[in-house]
Image (spheres, helix red, strand yellow):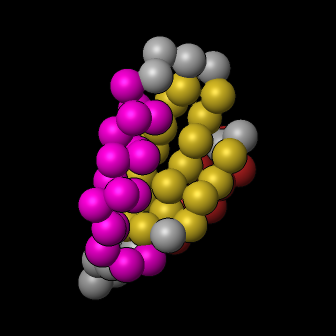
Amino acid sequence: MKRILHILTHPAKPEIEQLILDQQNSPDQEVLVLSLNEENPDYKLLLEKVLQSDSIQCW
């Protein structure tokens, strides 16, 4: 199963949200979305997920 990580650096635009939803509905992909828009992002978790992912998109 392909692991896809989406890193949000800004609020997601509607077309990006739709892309993520489409990928989440695919049975052969595991999709994780992490937001850096929070007051204190968890960079340790981010690094862990980056190292585990097959594909990374940063928006």
Q: Is residue 31 magenta?
A: no
Res. 49 visible in picture: yes
Residue for point 59% across, 58% down: 57
Q: Is residue 24 magenta?
A: yes
Find residue 24 and report its image quarter: top left
Residue for point 54% across, 26% down: 29
Magenta stretch in the rendered image:
9-25
Front position in the image: 48 or 34: 34
Front position in the image: 17 or 58: 17
Numbered disc total: 0
Find residue 37 and report its image quarter: bottom left
Q: Position of residue 45 (x, y in %)?
A: 50, 58
Q: Main secondary structure of the magenta part?
A: helix
Relative to 43, say whether 5 is above or below: above
Q: Position of residue 33 (x, y in %)?
A: 41, 52
- Outermost residue toward the top? 27
Relative to 48, say whether 1 is above or below: above
Residue for point 58% across, 41% down: 4
- Outermost residue toward the front? 15
Residue for point 56% across, 67% down: 58
Relative to 49, say whether 26 is above or below: above
Find residue 56 and report its image quarter: bottom right
Q: Is residue 47 left or right of residue 21?
A: right
Front position in the image: 29 or 34: 29
Res. 42 visible in picture: no
Q: Position of residue 46 (x, y in %)?
A: 54, 61
Looking at the rendered image, the quarter that the N terminus falls into is: top right
Q: Position of residue 47 (x, y in %)?
A: 62, 61
